[in-house]
Image: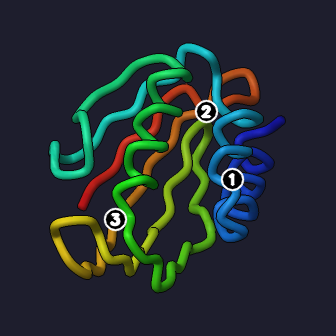
């Protein structure tokens, strides 16, 4: 898959709330994830299984989901970025609206790096 194809598929699946499918089909086994802070879990994890665990932990922390918007991707060579806004109530933290810039690197048709800025 090209970077554009990966980006378009990731956005499509995320808009359908199919995060597990995104990870299973679009991520490399050795992918890396970097958060802006430790507010949403570990700042840095490496490997698909660790990213899946981090995602599951995040989803378990959501008490109630109120909505989300995901922009169309901006693509440049082997990278793409998008804006993701999430409105959710988190256990012990209450309702929050989060807006983040998500940046992804693609190699050989798979996401090898995700990095979040919020």
Which of the 4 image quarters holds residue 21? Answer: top right
Callout 2: helix, strand or loop? Answer: strand
Are the two marked residues, 1 and 2, in contact with CB atoms closer than 8 angstroms? yes
Mark 2–mark 3 distance (CA, rounded to whole Å): 18 Å
Q: Which residue carries the number 3 mark? A: 100
Callout 1: helix, strand or loop? Answer: helix
Split into 4 quadrants, where in the image is the C terminus?
bottom left
Report the residue at 51% width, 42% height from top. Answer: 104
Of callouts 1 and 2, the N-terminal one:
1
Of callouts 1 and 3, the N-terminal one:
1
Of callouts 2 and 3, the N-terminal one:
3
Percent x, y of residue 83? 45, 69
Between 12 and 41, the one nearer to me in the picture: 41
* Number of residue marks: 3
Report the residue at 62% width, 71% height from top. Answer: 72
Percent x, y of residue 50? 45, 23
Q: Which residue carries the number 1 mark? A: 10
């Amino acid at each position: 898959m090209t970077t554009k194809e990966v980006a378009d598929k990731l956005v499509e699946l995320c808009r359908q709330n199919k995060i597990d499918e995104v990870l299973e089909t679009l991520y490399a086994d050795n992918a890396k994830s970097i958060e802006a802070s430790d507010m949403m879990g570990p700042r840095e994890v490496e490997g698909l299984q660790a990213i899946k665990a981090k995602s599951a932990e995040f989803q378990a922390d959501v008490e109630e989901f109120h909505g989300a918007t995901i922009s169309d991707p901006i693509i440049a060579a082997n990278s793409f970025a998008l804006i993701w806004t999430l409105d959710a109530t988190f256990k012990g933290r209450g309702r929050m609206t989060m807006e983040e810039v998500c940046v992804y690197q693609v190699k050989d048709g798979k996401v090898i790096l995700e990095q979040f800025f919020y």
